[in-house]
Image (spheres, coloured by chain):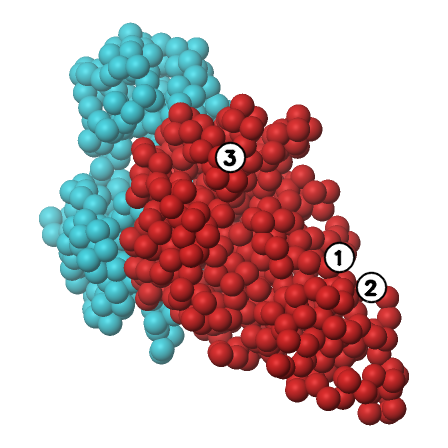
Chain colours: A red, B cyan
Amino acid sequence: MTTVLITGTRPYGEGDPVDVLIDDGVITRIVPTVAGGRDAGGPDSAASAADEVIEAAGTVLLPGFVDMHTHLREPGREDAETVRSGSAAAARGGYTAVFAMANTEPVADTAVVTDHVYAQGQAVGLVDVHPVGAVTKGLAGAELAEMGVMAASSAAVRLFSDDGHCVADPLIMRRALEYARGLDVLIAQHAEEPRLTEGAVAHEGPTAARLGLAGWPRAAEESIVIRDALLARDAGARVHICHASTAGTVELIRWAKDQGIAITAEVTPHHLMLDDARLESYDGIFRVNPPLREESDTRALRAALADGVVDCVATDHAPHAAQDKCCEFSQARPGMLGLETALGVVAQTMVAPGLIDWRGVADVMSVRPAQITGLPDHGRPIEVGETANLTVVDPDSAWTVRGAELASIADNTPYEDLTLPARVRATLLRGRVTCVDGKVRAR
Amino acid sequence: MKHLLSIGDLTPDSAVDLLDEADRFKAALLGREVRKLPTLRGRTVMTVFFENSTRTRASFEVAGKWMSADVINVSAGTSSVSKGESLRDTAATLHAIGADALIVRHPASGAPRQVARWTAEMAQDGVAPSVINAGDGMHEHPTQALLDALTLRDRLGGIEGRRVGIVGDILHSRVARSNALLLTMLGADVVLIAPPTLMPLGADGWGVTVAHDLDSELPGLDAVMMLRVQAERMRGGFFPSPREYSIRYGLSETRRRMLPEHAVILHPGPMLRGMEIGYSVADSPQAAPLQQVANGVHVRMAVLFRLLVGGQVDA
Ligand SMILES: [Zn+2]
């Protein structure tokens, strides 16, 4: 039995500072912090007996973050990321649960692969790794994968996605939604009409036209979003839209929600912060799917996240080996690192301008993704009796991003040399400290 | 000016200066039996073509040789695109060999800019090669635009206030992009003429006019620049058929007669006679394809001279 005491922190950044005592993985006491500290004769004698004390004055305490959209690359591309390195990145980023996308090599379209990823995550123990199952065999979009078997396996797969590819065939998508309803699992769609994005490497707009880069039109995303909303309506199923990237997508989701359709959506930190002006350098670091859009889109996405039309932030953490990024822009593999920088980017784009407060951060980075994916002990209120999946955030600790210093094996961060305003001080998974001050604690 | 990667690297003054310099080289070589100037003696120029183009490579090669540079042709072929050797590795090798200028053609937009950045990063002594974009993907082909401008200046006596139509596959054309930038910079009215499927999104923000009907534009043009339509585009649904394209956008003899008499006809070559341009039109006195080729050498001499020896041009 281990006890951890976090002193002087403010849950959700609200109210007076408190000391939070965690006993055997559960929050057992939340008491006001005594001025001068507990050694000055505070009332809580149990606290002074804690095995570990995290002095956290000035911090904000949040429920541990949940990432619905992570690429861990294992099995197959362990040169870019492994379950171990990705778990370390997650712990440093304040995450207590991540969903590992199915586009591995081999594809996670059988319980053999999902169970392997799950077991690896358990063995590492830094973050709950929930494997995502493929919707279709080999992500080929033609035949449904054995979703029921994966759902019933030890990994208990709850989320299915062909991410990286769109389930483009409308009939297959309809069947997937219907079948998922019967299993009470969720389909997450990478919305990209493939015919409209053949050869595309950048957002279709004035910048791509000037730079001579083949364009990825907004309609390629939006046409799938509205189609899937209608299919979900007819199937009585839930559908989740991965990495919403356009102002139009926001309006379509708003409409669908108004109709009572069970649709949810995520936005990535990079689509909140970056726009296609970054492509000027032709640096492959900035190639991502969907592409960085225009400033009007980033503004719409921020507003939509603030007002709840977009439900949550998901990183789309996509590590790539250096040779897959340091090449011609059109040859660069799409994707960016995200786990360790997500909080800082959300703080910069959403909290600093006053679009949301820290309770809002808890909602979009923890509560909502845990609800959407059905995780019972993540995204819970910070209260006595709750499982201690927690993130301690220092809201005033500006730090400069250096790809080489991140825990990921890859270093393809789009924020190199950028200073972000806030940082994770500590992460606790079921009461165990997985990371403190950037140091990851393997079990 | 260190590199010529885009027309955007030029100012109106530096562009005019390059054209004037090209004229001086032309005059200097006029009537000479041995066309050899000592200008770039001891300098090494490499053409690095990841995509075939006999005419552009030969033009740069001749330009370098007429100025006594050592010109080395590196045949990069298309191998690096298949990721055998990465573009960055190739850049490192070329940097290590130590050329003064790299003339880069590449099927990927932006590749010359990346080569310039990488070789600058690699240069511990601060000495990195000048990079000239000899055509990159769908992006730009700045020396082609300069030679076109020189040809128009020769034929029309000036560019400012002239109306130039650029016709055809604007979307995929680096020649069109560079020309639209340069000609508007030099004060011309540019009208882009193509079906909407071959018109880049946002072209109306380039300071040009966008049009879809060639016939109504022809009488008002001082010059018409026909673009090459690549065979692979013809099946891509960009237009119904080569026949229809030719009927709507080909520069037939009938259409040539709709142009003002003084109008100049340009084509970057190689010409698809019969479809893009009528057989007789290409040989008409208004057509200037051979003058374009000749001017190409002088323009490239001017660019190499300015980049390697310096002078008044600034970026
Ligand atoms: Zn995706």
* Chain under numbered label 1: A
Horizontal relation, residue A367 to residue A332: left or right: right
Residue under label 2: A14
Horizontal relation, residue B121 to residue B267: left or right: right
Label 2 with label 1: CB-CB less than 8 Å = yes
Amino acid, disc 3: Arg
Q: Quadrant of residue A357?
A: bottom right
Q: Does mark 1 fall on the same chain as mark 3?
A: yes
Amino acid, disc 2: Glu
Amino acid, disc 1: Arg
Residue under label 3: A181
> Tag 3, which secondary structure?
helix
Q: Pinpoint residue A306: horizontal percent, then vertical percent.
A: 71, 46
Q: Residue at x 16, y 46 (%)?
A: B58
- Check the image and name the residue furthest to the left: B33
Q: Is residue B45 visible?
A: no
Q: Is residue B240 visible?
A: yes
Q: Pinpoint residue A128: horizontal percent, then vertical percent.
A: 51, 63
Q: Identify the mark nearer the N-term, 3 or 1.
A: 3
Q: Nearer the viewer, residue A238 or B312?
A: A238
The dot on residue A151 is: none
Residue under label 1: A359
Q: Alpha-carbon distance for marks 3 and 1?
A: 31 Å
Q: Would you place residue A27 above or below residue B207 in this image?
A: below
Q: Quadrant of residue B83?
A: bottom left
**10 Å neighbourhood of mark 2: few (<14), some, or many (≥20)?**
few
